[in-house]
Image: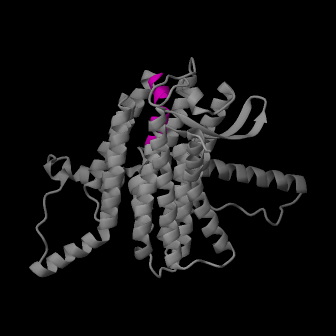
Amino acid sequence: MLQAADWLNVLGLLALGAPFALVCLLGVTSLLDRKLSEAATGKLCQGASAVGLLAALGVVALMLWRGTRHEVIALGEWVVIPDYHFSVKLVFDRLSLPFAILSFLLCGTVAGFATRYMHRERGYNRFFVLYALFVLGMVLTALAGTIETLFAGWELVGLSSVLLVAFFQERPAPPRNGLRVWVVYRVSDAALLLAAIVMHHLRGEGDFYRLLGGEPWPDGHAALAGAAPLVVGVLLVIAAAGKSALAPFSGWLPRAMEGPTPSSAVFYGALSVHLGAFLLLRIGPLLEATVWLSAVVVALGLVTALYAYVVGSVQTDIKSALSFASLVQVGLIVAEIGLGFRYLALLHLIGNACLRTLQFIRAPSLLHDYHSLENALGGHLPRVGGPLGGAASSTRPWLYRFALERGYLDSLLAACVVTPFVRLFRACDALERRWTDFIAGRAAPESEAPQPYSVALEELP
């Protein structure tokens, strides 16, 4: 007879196992070139979301019945060496379970929409394989009890998101924009990986529960002393900023709208864009250990919200306008986290994710209804003055230019980050070529002069 603890383990593993089984089934059939039919693929995706959702709700019911706030399923230590323990743990608490339930609910909703939206699309099967990877990554990130487990889910979310941005490969813009998103994600991932290394150097492990004082979320305190909380916190804030498109990484968000509408809805409007805020919620006690870091998080959130409001006011396509509207709320959520309002931030996150999913899904039919209404009236509907219309006449042109150029963030990053890196790598390449030519005593055939720097910049996407 299974005890309550056994049932909790079964349901907890089932919550993660459902999307994992979906990835395996869709992936294996694709590799064997025995792709499932559209109807079967849609039913499997919705079924996996339903099973995962019911399992997560079952865990909630068992925890309420047992009166516990923190449950852990340990899947073993995969690597054990001195000062390093790579362990896989699933944690169920007041943060992970709502986020996992939200992921299953919204992904299931979007799966039902996508089966019709993507009907007879050439990349139908590819879309749902990437969709399954995304769901698995979101659930794994939500339930991660260690930074290594979180990093694995973080990478799955990033990989599937970028490949769906570049979904329409026959057009030049989607692959270029996918590359832009991938570069920003690499910066975010590098910061998260460095944070994991620092945590292991300081504590010998990456367990969030022990790092935050061994108390259930949202209680707890940083178990690090001195400058360690500031170092780890700064790295994790950078990781969150890149993933959630916070300033100055906000330029990739409208580029992500090149993907299909279902992926835009569940990724950049609802779930993926909130992943950075989720990480900050998880490490909330670490932020509170340093007043300056909390102040930086508040400032980052407010600046992002103001930037997204101004830029979103002049967007001419509905998906970009919705993405910036979502970013405004993400910025406010981050500011709430910095101020210590964790429950408020979690509720705000859930509400914003649900609203943006509905708006993105409704967007195609809304445009159709809008045009039908204009045809019925025999002319364009009256335009309402934009939010920038109230600005002073002297500053209005500058504000509009600033908003139309999306804050010049892409140009600034290209000038301050990309350009120095390109110059450095070209200098290293030239040095290596001269060194190999010196050793060989002659110019090697492959030792061709590098392209001029200006040409290299023109080739950047």
Instruction: Name the side, left or right, on which 113 lies relative to 190.
Output: left
**Rendering quarter of residue 4:** top right
| Residue at the (31%, 54%) spot, across then down | 355
Quadrant including the N terminus: top right
Query: In the rendered image, which quarter is residue 319 located in?
Result: bottom left
Residue 237 percent coordinates (x, y)? 49, 36
The residue stretch that appears in magenta: 277-289
Residue 144: % across, % down: 57, 42
Name the one closer to the observer, 242 or 158: 158
Q: Nearer the viewer, residue 344 or 101?
A: 101
Q: Is residue 415 left or right of residue 342?
A: right
Residue closer to the observer: 47 or 267: 47
Q: Residue at x 31, y 58 (%)?
A: 322
Q: Is residue 269 visible in this depiction of the protein?
A: yes
Residue occupying image coordinates x 65% and y 79%: 34
Q: Principal SS element in the magenta part?
A: helix
Residue 12 position within the rendered picture, expressed as x and y whole percent measured from the top left:
56, 46
